Image (spheres, helix red, strand yellow):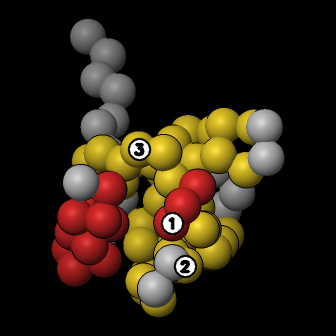
Amino acid sequence: MVQTILKTSLESHKMITIMYQKGNSITRRNIEVKAIDGNKIKAYCHLRKQTRVFNLDNILAADVYRSKICH
């Protein structure tokens, strides 16, 4: 499921949301996938405001980006 969402982001150039674990820390990040190379995901990270490389094994979950709508 995670790989399908990553590929969809890559092909459609759309933002997705991932839960990412690095060490003992888990963060939610909005990313746009730029390349997939084996176990490495190159993506623009909106949290860090720069292109980053993510390890596929550390991506706990992925979903389509849903913006918050205020009424």
User: Count the marks: how many?
Assistant: 3
In the rendered image, residue 61, in percent from the top left (x then y), is placed at: 41, 44
Q: Earlier in the sequence, mark 2 or mark 1?
A: 2
Name which residue lies at 63% across and 39% down.
27
Q: Earlier in the sequence, mark 3 or mark 2?
A: 2
Residue, disc 2: 40
Name which residue lies at 30% across and 65% down.
3
Q: Nearer the viewer, residue 9 or 23?
A: 23
28 lies left or right of 68: right
**Residue 49 is drawn in which quadrant?**
bottom right
State the CA–CA distance, disc 3 to disc 2.
15 Å
SS of the residue under disc 2: strand
Residue 56 disc label: 1
Is residue 31 among what the camera can see? yes
22 lies left or right of 53: right
| Residue contact between numbered discs 3 and 1, judged by CB atoms under 8 Å | no
| Residue contact between numbered discs 2 and 1, judged by CB atoms under 8 Å | yes
Residue 27 disc label: none
In the rendered image, residue 41, in percent from the top left (x then y), is placed at: 51, 75
35 lies left or right of 43: left
Q: Is residue 30 above or below residue 36?
A: above
| Label 1 neighbour load within 10 Å: few <14, some 14-19, many 20+ | some
State the CA–CA distance, disc 2 to disc 1.
6 Å
Residue 61 disc label: 3
**Residue occupying the far top of the picture:** 71
Is residue 46 among what the camera can see? no
